């Protein structure tokens, strides 16, 4: 039933306030035409809108249109109300909103959509769109929607937010997959349109459900930058609707808390002097603590830190003021910039045309030089992207307008929202610890010993072995909890190889590790899904660089021993040099192709062990190590390596309490599996 109410022919010319009320019931569209001045739309009921807009579409039961302020206007058609399908955009604060007409988006033929443009900082614009797609839409309508999504992605808007009811229950937005396999399906085409437009979808839980029916995810929140929306909260439905209300904050810009931290500028270090200072008689340094690994390591750190302080400058960095800037060669630019300022001052003093022309020439030179240096800097980053991806992604991150922030987390135990850096760090620490395997006390089953011709009982760590490891270090990696930098180790390899070989040999002989090697700092990295769920974060561990070098030396020896004794399965891929997972895929593809060519059948079962690396049981791992013929000092070192380990989760620089690591070890999973 269509109900149409029109007030036409009303002519008003006045200064003051005009109020027109229209009573309607149902889904309505309100169009205000011909108004001059501030138009305040007040929606009586559950919806309140306050905005400046030429066109607004709302769902209400009563509409009040009030012209507020000094208004001089002739209103020919004041209000037109009719029952139609409803799509609307609300603005809860008074902002300047400009409606984007659909024909402005390159002639889009999709009708059930409203787009508005909001002015932001520095010429940026936010495009806000609300879309409704009927579940019974025709193929033409679906194609028009997909075309609209692509055209929105092609138009220049620094920020894009698209919401609405898309009515695609068959899409899994966690993996961006559909239930069907056809590439001609409507839901598959929508996914491809979103991918082509580089949109990110933030709703992961069902948004519509009725009693007895399967809940479905129908309502979407799409943005052009992943970090524009940190989390989406599902609230109760409005009125008689069975759709959830989706509440989320839109982060248009990076919000930074002013912080300052001092760090070493390794690129400006005097490494010749550093090598000279560190190249002294380490046997004399370690003379009084020959078998005490803890004391040896502390002495080494004392000498290391004192030398680094003397040879490498420190600088205080802040996160405010340099955001988004491209670091250029300031010495190259400084002279030109000073000259530009001088010519400007002379022009201001003389007001002569010749001085102004000189200033313009200097201004153009500075701009040309800046662009040239920026291009060269970006080219150097691109050329180093494979060797130093960290530098590449740091530069990309500096150019984005938003940042990935950790929202309030939901406690799995109580369902409460947890805020505060310390509280979130503790919650994540508890979750990461909860996945560890808790081995039962008492004896564990023993595997029968293998018949081996040789055993791996000891290892002599030479200076040459350590030197090669130091030379192959990735210098872009961060220092560990003990603050030892891989850049310094690499640069000072000739001087540090001998003392480090001494420390490693002492550690292996005594079957003990320095206490600082047993501690790890954990950063929680978001994977996918709901950012408020702790299970959707994976732990990334930061441990001592020197301990990693020791681990690498032992791993090489263990793998060589296993290969020599043919103890590794020929079906083992990964963790072994020359047998990558890519080679495994090629082998499988070749085998399957051969079976199909011979008319055979292929049955394939794919398994994935949940948290496999974190669940490696320590006692059973050591039992298998012994079974495979690894004994004496190496076995003892591995036992101490796995014992009494702890980790702390860090959120925004705040650390959780240390938590015991009772299982898991990525280094030696090859021995277990």
Image: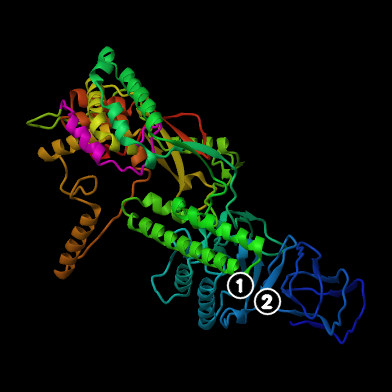
Mark 2–mark 1 distance (CA, rounded to whole Å)? 9 Å
Q: Is residue 474 left or right of residue 63?
A: left
Q: Residue beneath label 1, please? A: 132
Q: Is residue 201 left or right of residue 559?
A: right
The numbered dot on residue 85 is: 2
Name the residue at the left extreme: 453
Tell me the residue at 28%/56% (across/down). Answer: 605
Q: Position of residue 391 (x, y in %)?
A: 40, 50
Q: Position of residue 122 (x, y in %)?
A: 62, 62
- Residue 474: in magenta span: yes
Position of the C terminus by quadrant = top left
Most frequent secondary structure within the magenta stretch: loop
C-beta proximity under 8 Å, tags 2 and 1: yes
Is residue 644 shown above or below 250? above
Position of the N terminus by quadrant = bottom right
Viewer-side residue, 150 vs 139 = 150
Tell me the residue at 50%/63% (across/down). Answer: 367
Q: Position of residue 292 (x, y in %)?
A: 29, 16
Hey, which quadrant is residue 550 in on the image? top left
């Amino acid at each position: 039933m269509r109900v149409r109410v029109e007030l036409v022919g009303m002519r008003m010319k006045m200064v003051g306030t005009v109020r027109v009320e229209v009573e309607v019931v149902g889904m309505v569209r309100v169009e205000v035409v011909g108004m001059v001045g501030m138009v305040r739309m007040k929606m009586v009921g559950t919806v309140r809108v306050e905005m400046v807009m030429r066109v607004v579409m709302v769902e209400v039961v009563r509409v009040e249109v009030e012209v507020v302020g000094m208004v001089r206007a002739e209103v020919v058609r004041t209000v037109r109300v009719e029952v139609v399908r409803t799509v609307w955009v609300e603005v809860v604060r008074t902002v300047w909103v400009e409606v984007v007409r659909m024909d402005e988006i390159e002639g889009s033929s999709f009708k059930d959509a409203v787009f508005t443009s909001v002015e932001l900082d520095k010429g940026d614009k936010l495009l806000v769109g609300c879309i409704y797609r009927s579940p019974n839409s025709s193929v033409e309508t679906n194609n028009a929607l997909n075309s609209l999504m692509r055209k929105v992605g092609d138009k220049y808007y620094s920020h894009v937010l698209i919401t609405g009811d898309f009515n695609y229950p068959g899409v899994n937005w966690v993996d961006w997959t559909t239930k069907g396999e056809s590439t001609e399906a409507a839901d598959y085409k929508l996914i491809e349109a979103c991918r082509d437009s580089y949109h990110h979808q933030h709703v992961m839980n069902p948004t519509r459900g009725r009693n007895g029916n399967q809940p479905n995810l129908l309502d979407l929140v799409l943005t052009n930058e992943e970090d524009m929306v940190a989390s989406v909260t599902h609230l109760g439905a409005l009125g008689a609707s069975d759709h959830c209300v989706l509440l989320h904050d839109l982060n248009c810009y990076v919000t930074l808390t002013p912080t300052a931290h001092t760090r070493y500028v390794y690129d400006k270090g005097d490494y010749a002097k550093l090598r000279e200072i560190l190249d002294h008689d380490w046997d004399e340094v370690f003379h009084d603590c020959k078998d005490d690994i803890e004391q040896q390591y502390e002495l080494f750190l004392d000498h290391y830190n004192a030398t680094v302080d003397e040879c490498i400058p420190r600088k205080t960095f802040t996160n405010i003021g340099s955001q988004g800037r491209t670091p250029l060669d300031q010495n190259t630019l400084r002279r030109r910039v000073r000259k530009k300022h001088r010519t400007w001052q002379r022009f201001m003093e003389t007001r002569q045309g010749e001085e102004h022309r000189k200033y313009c020439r200097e201004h153009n030179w500075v701009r040309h030089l800046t662009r040239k240096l920026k291009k060269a800097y970006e080219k150097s980053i691109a050329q180093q992207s494979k060797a130093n991806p960290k530098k590449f992604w740091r530069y990309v991150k500096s150019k984005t307008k938003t940042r990935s922030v950790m929202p309030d987390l939901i406690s799995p135990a109580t369902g409460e929202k947890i805020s505060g850096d310390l509280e979130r760090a503790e919650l994540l620490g508890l979750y990461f610890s909860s996945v560890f395997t808790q081995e039962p006390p008492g004896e564990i089953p023993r595997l029968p010993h293998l018949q081996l011709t040789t055993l791996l009982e000891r290892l002599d760590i030479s200076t040459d072995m350590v030197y090669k490891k130091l030379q192959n270090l990735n210098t872009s990696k961060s220092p560990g909890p003990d603050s030892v930098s891989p850049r310094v180790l690499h640069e000072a390899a000739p001087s540090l190889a001998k003392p480090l070989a001494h420390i490693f040999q002492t550690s292996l002989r005594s079957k003990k590790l320095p206490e600082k090697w047993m501690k790890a700092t954990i950063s929680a990295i978001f994977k996918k899904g709901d950012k408020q769920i702790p299970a959707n974060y994976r732990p990334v561990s930061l441990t001592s660089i020197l301990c990693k070098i020791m681990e690498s030396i032992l791993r090489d020896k263990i793998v060589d021993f296993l290969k020599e004794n043919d103890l590794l399965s020929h079906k083992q891929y990964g963790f072994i040099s020359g047998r990558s997972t890519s080679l495994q895929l090629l082998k499988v593809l070749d085998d399957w192709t051969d079976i199909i060519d011979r008319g055979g059948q292929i049955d394939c079962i794919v398994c994935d062990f949940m948290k496999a690396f974190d669940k490696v049981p320590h006692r059973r791992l050591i039992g298998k190590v012994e079974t495979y013929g690894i004994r004496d000092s190496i076995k003892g070192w591995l036992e101490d390596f796995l014992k009494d380990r702890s980790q702390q989760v860090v959120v925004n620089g705040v650390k959780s309490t240390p938590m015991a690591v009772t299982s898991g070890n990525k280094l030696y999973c090859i021995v277990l599996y």
